[in-house]
Amino acid sequence: MSLSAGAGGYGSAAIWFVIVVLALATYAIRLSFIYLFGRLESVPEVVERVLRLVPAAVLAALAIPAIVTIEPSLSATVLDERIAAGTVAVVVAWRTENVFATIASGIGTLWLLRVVVV
């Protein structure tokens, strides 16, 4: 392992130090929640309600950047197959509240629009 300066003028030892410190901090944060929930006899209702929203928030955070586009015209934006697939997925999510059905409907709609229709 070389101790020469890498990107940004930092040596490889400094970069490895930052990686190890961040890994330990991430592990400590995750372990703290496991330790905390092991010590509690019951999880507060507010925490349970917030935790129920985590899958939807993560799915939205993963899907929205892939759907949102900046096209030069309104018609290109409206006719984008990703927006149609996202709209179908939102409707399925709203009606079924099922994550698998939501993902399957979005992927299926996108596949149909890209392969069969176009």
Image (cartoon, helix red, strand yellow):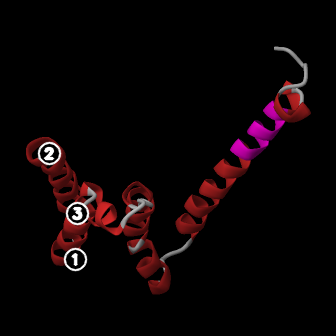
Foreground: disc 1 or disc 2? 2
- Magenta residues, start to end: 15-23
| SS state under label 1 | helix
Q: Which amino acid does the dot numbered 2 rest on? A: Val
Residues packed near mark 3 inside 10 Å, few (<14), some (14 to 19) or many (20 plus): some
Q: Do the numbered discs 1 and 3 sit on residues whose CB atoms are within 8 Å?
A: no
Task: Tell me, yes or no, if residue 6 can be seen here.
Answer: yes
Query: In the depicted view, which residue is nearer to us: 61 or 25?
Result: 61
Q: Tell me which numbered mark, 1 or 3, is placed earlier along the sequence.
A: 3
Q: Which residue in the protein does label 1 denote?
A: 94
Q: Which residue in the protein does label 2 denote?
A: 118
- Magenta span contains residue 82: no
- The spot of residue 101 in percent (x, y) is 17, 60
Q: Which residue in the protein does label 3 denote?
A: 84
* Quadrant housing the C terminus: top left
Q: Which amino acid does the dot numbered 3 rest on? A: Ala
The residues tagged by marks 1 and 3 sit, at their Cα atoms, a distance apart of: 15 Å
